[in-house]
Amino acid sequence: MSIKKASCHCRAVELSIDLAGGFRDIRRCNCSLCKRKGAIMGSVPLSAVTVTRGEENLGMYQWNTQVAKHYFCKICGIYTHHQRRSNPDEYGFNLGCVEGVDPFDFEPVAVGDGASR
């Protein structure tokens, strides 16, 4: 089954992620925000992520170029996904939010150079 359920820590926000292409482009990012949140992220097309519960509980943060959209739960603060600045047609999603997935199973993880873009 390629559809995976993901949620924030308090489960106020739930996502459905279509991983038909499998887990791909697993990485961390060294931009000023991502290095602070420390998440290991996967990539999917925008059409592969659906908020199935709690859209009203999602906060969104933008800065600098205002292209990337970083989403987080307004209740527990967990980053769930973001629309990428490097490819606005993709979402990066937090592997730690995907049910049954241990993000540390993907170590070592490549680091994308978001700080230089």
Image (tube, grey):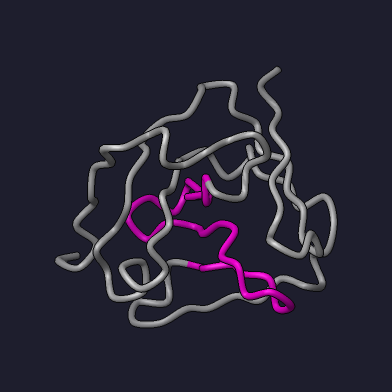
Relative to 9, is 1 above or below? above
Q: Position of residue 2 (x, y in %)?
A: 66, 22
What residue span does the magenta drawing correspond to? 69-95
Q: Residue furthest left?
A: 116
Q: Is 32 left or right of 38, judged from the image as shown?
A: left
Quadrant assignment, res 42: top left
Residue 23 spot, x, y in % from top left: 47, 29
Quadrant where the C terminus sits is bottom left
Image x and y of residue 74, in percent: 70, 78
Q: Nearer the viewer, residue 11 or 45?
A: 11
Q: Is residue 96 magenta?
A: no
Q: Is residue 110 above or below residue 75?
A: above
| Front in this rendered view, residue 29 or 85 | 29
Marks counted in the figure total 0
Nearer to the camera, 16 or 11: 11
Instruction: Name which residue lies at 31% across and 37% down.
Output: 107
In the image, is residue 31 above or below residue 42?
below
Taking 27 as reference, is 114 left or right? left
Quarter of the image where the N terminus is located: top right
In which quarter of the view is residue 25 placed? top left
